[in-house]
Amino acid sequence: MQLTNFGEQFSSEVLKKTYASMLTDSIANREYEGEIKKPGDRVNILSFLNSILLSDYVVGSDMASETIVDAEDQLVVEKRKYYNFSLDRLEDLFTYGGDIPEHLTNDGAKQLEKLIDTYVLDAAGEAAVQNWVGTNLVVNGSGQTMASITTTATGGTITINATSNTYEGQVGSVENPIDGLTYNGGFEAADIGKGIRLRSTASFVSPFYKITSVTSSTVATITEWDGAVSGSDFEEGHTLRGLFGGDGKSFPKYGDGNATLLTMSGLGWEINAAIATAVSAASIYDQVTLLSEKLNNAEVADIDRKLSVPAEGLTALKQAAELQPTGIAEIYSGVVLNGRVMRFGGFDVHMAAGARLSTRAGHSTSSTTGPSTDLVLVTGTIGTQMLANHIGFVTYADKWSESRVVDAENQFAKKYQGLFLFGKKVPAGRRKFGATLFGSF
């Protein structure tokens, strides 16, 4: 880079760019052990998997000793970004633009902040599958539809079919009772990462399991929301929880008299937040309270909760009738701290400006109905993944590995160089500390 206009050499400063505030320092934690020295380094996140057991004390009897199980998740410093630009040293002789190096390095740092926010907020896709808010896709079980589940060493497999409308491995289109629209009844790539549960009736269901891969439109691989395959809340010999079903919240370990979902036939299925729900001033109040409910059901502390929304989300909140006529004073105070623009519904609300929030397509709609042999699909609505989380949800680590100024060879110039290392991790047990609103504006 070389500057050639010295006509205004007595000007004092370069006009500086402005950027939205960084969110990461407010929505993530840095609770890890270890030191970052080079790309690929790992730092450890220590957590304890079981709570302290409270037992009855009997006089004259010895107390039982409990072993606390600790686990270490490893955060990999996987990202590396650098800048390397040169300035002609002749500029040092002029007062014009005396702060050029400072301005340019600050510009690079601010762009790095946006990149980091985007990287960290992408963790919305790792929130526990039962903690998503969107429009569910429900296929009721009947004589025409059927789903079955088998367990594997790493989780399980769900197979769906329809005895009269399966054609070459395709399930036909179905009408979703949630919104009355017609969708692809089978699995697709857009479902990966979402939750699925089997249902005998609306009041007898399995827990939501995480779809990890789609083998075909009728077969999907699943795991537990936290990836676990055993524990005190698993039925012996099985790698999935709640296989005796429950009411959606309670899943007795050995069932309540109903048959196990492993052997039941005629089951329907439900994909959680399969479709981006419409977000507007009329709906956002209820949607945020649902996010809060998800965290409450997971017994997540009601302090240090964060909600990241795009500019459209902030506008919807300000226009919501529930916050009128006076609203909350902080909405209009204009106070911004690390992107925090207001407090609402128990959350510190942060505006994730630009394209910081990740997006993805929802489940495909269908332009045909019934058991068609020529299923015509339309890509689902693109939705934004808005993260609601306790600060313990995602751990972030970074380090400026190098930052230096060197003389350029064969030129009267200086080179400004910097190398930045960073990484994030959502520990498996902390996935329930996050909830995701999958919505479109």
Image (tube, rainbow, N blue to C red):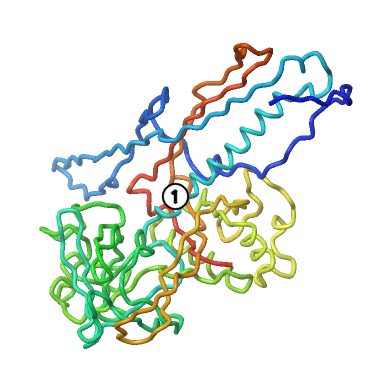
394 in relation to 180, above or below: above
Where residue 241 appears, as percent x and y from the top left, is: 22, 61
Considering the numbered disc 1 on the image, is that residue within a helix, a strand or a loop? helix
Where residue 338 appears, as percent x and y from the top left, is: 62, 43
Which image quadrant for residue 238? Answer: bottom left
Q: Quadrant of the N terminus?
A: top right
Where residue 173 appears, as percent x and y from the top left, is: 35, 81
Q: Quadrant of the C terminus?
A: bottom right
Q: Residue at x 18, y 74 (%)?
A: 256
Q: Residue furthest front?
A: 410
Q: Residue at x 24, y 61 (%)?
A: 221
Is residue 338 toward the left or the right of residue 69 in the image? right
- Report how many numbered discs are placed on residues in the image: 1
Name the residue type under label 1: Ala
Which image quadrant for residue 223? Answer: bottom left
Which residue is tagged 1?
A: 123
Where residue 151 appears, as percent x and y from the top left, is: 16, 62
Which image quadrant for residue 160? Answer: bottom left
